[in-house]
Each structure stands twice: as structure tokens, then as C-alpha cells.
């Protein structure tokens, strides 16, 4: 007879539970099928044989899913530290976003026109864009906004 310690028994029950869940979800529709659970059987041999079979199936699936072997596992302390650290980071970010919103609820103010410094190339480019836009507006409505004909002085632009 094979002797199992408490951790192995808990692991076997967990694997069996996972397997039963998968089998239940695999059924298309209808009531859940009751699966015979060897873990609740009084016979120790049936329990051990069922646990070994389920573990074997699970190891086979894992091997087929990742033929190179299992990925390195983090220790429980590393996982707990990472989760705590992530929660703390999210909390700090939330506090900072709240402070920024309360300090300036409408977002940063655009710079004043006097603060913007243009060089000669930018100024020429701005004049060219304005000229193109005025030409488009004139071609779209040659008579002007009120439907009146424009004079030569109104059409001429300083460039």
C-alpha cells in the first residue's frame, strides 16, 4: 500500500477537483454530470489509483502544452511581494492623478500668444497656410459671405 502525506493528499484532491471542473465544462448543455469521486471512497486503493491516474493525465497535458518543461516558478514570498507592490503602485498613481486633477481640473492652460516664439521659417509657413485657406474660401464662395461681389481690394491680400 502506498502512503501519502497530507500535502500530497491535498494536491491530489485539488487536481481531481480541477479535472472534474473541466469535465463538467466540456459537456455541451444540460445538468452537470455527477462524476464518481474516488477521494470519498472508503477503499484506499481506489483513492490512490484515481489520484495517480488524474495526476498522470494532468502531467501529460502540461507536457504537451509546454514540451520544453515547466516554466520557473516564483516562490510564495515573491508572489506576495509583487502583489503588494502592485497594489501600492496603483494606490500611489491614483492619489497623484487626484492631486493633478484638483490642482488644474481643466488640464494645462495653452501658452499665451506672446509666449510662443516663431522663427522665420515657421512665420513664412503660417502665412502660406493662411493664404491657401483664404484662396479655398474665396473659390468656395466667390461673392463673399453676404452673397455680395467682392471688390479687387477685398480680394487682394498682403503677403
Image (cartoon, helix red, strand yellow):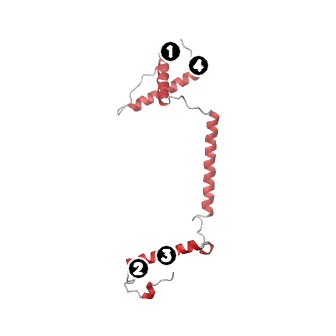
Whether label 1 touches label 4, CB < 8 Å:
no
- Residue occupied by mark 2: 138
Q: Please tell me how crowded label 2 is: few (under 14), some (14-19), or many (20+) other residues with Cα within 10 Å.
A: some
Tag in front: 3 or 1: 3
Whether label 4 touches label 3, CB < 8 Å:
no
Residue 115 x, y percent position in the rendering? 63, 72
- Residue occupied by mark 3: 130
Q: Nearer the viewer, residue 4 or 65?
A: 65
Which of the labelled discs sits on residue 44, or is there none? 1
Residue 24 x, y percent position in the rendering? 41, 30
Tag in front: 1 or 2: 2
Question: What's the distance in space between the residues labelled 3 and 2, CA to CA?
Answer: 12 Å
Which of the labelled discs sits on residue 5, or is there none? 4
Question: What's the distance in space between the residues labelled 1 and 4, CA to CA?
Answer: 13 Å
Question: What's the distance in space between the residues labelled 3 and 1, CA to CA?
Answer: 90 Å
Which residue sits at x=60%, y=70%?
111
Sequence-earlier tag: 4 or 3:
4
The vertical placement of 149 against 81, above or below, is: below
Q: What element carries label 1?
A: helix
Q: Is residue 99 left or right of residue 23?
A: right
Amino acid at each position: 500500500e502506498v502512503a501519502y502525506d497530507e500535502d500530497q493528499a491535498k494536491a491530489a484532491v485539488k487536481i481531481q477537483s480541477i479535472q472534474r471542473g473541466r469535465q463538467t465544462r466540456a459537456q455541451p448543455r444540460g445538468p452537470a454530470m455527477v462524476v464518481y469521486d474516488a477521494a470519498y471512497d472508503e477503499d484506499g486503493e481506489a483513492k490512490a489509483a484515481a489520484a495517480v491516474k488524474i495526476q498522470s493525465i494532468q502531467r501529460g497535458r502540461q507536457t504537451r502544452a509546454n514540451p520544453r518543461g515547466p516554466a520557473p516558478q516564483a516562490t510564495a514570498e515573491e508572489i506576495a511581494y509583487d502583489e503588494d507592490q502592485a497594489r501600492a503602485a496603483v494606490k500611489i498613481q491614483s492619489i497623484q492623478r487626484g492631486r493633478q486633477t484638483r490642482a488644474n481640473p481643466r488640464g494645462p492652460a495653452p501658452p499665451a500668444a506672446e509666449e510662443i516664439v516663431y522663427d522665420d521659417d515657421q512665420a513664412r509657413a503660417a502665412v502660406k497656410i493662411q493664404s491657401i485657406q483664404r484662396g479655398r474660401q474665396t473659390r468656395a464662395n466667390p461673392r463673399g459671405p453676404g452673397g455680395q461681389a467682392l471688390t479687387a481690394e477685398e480680394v487682394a491680400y498682403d503677403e
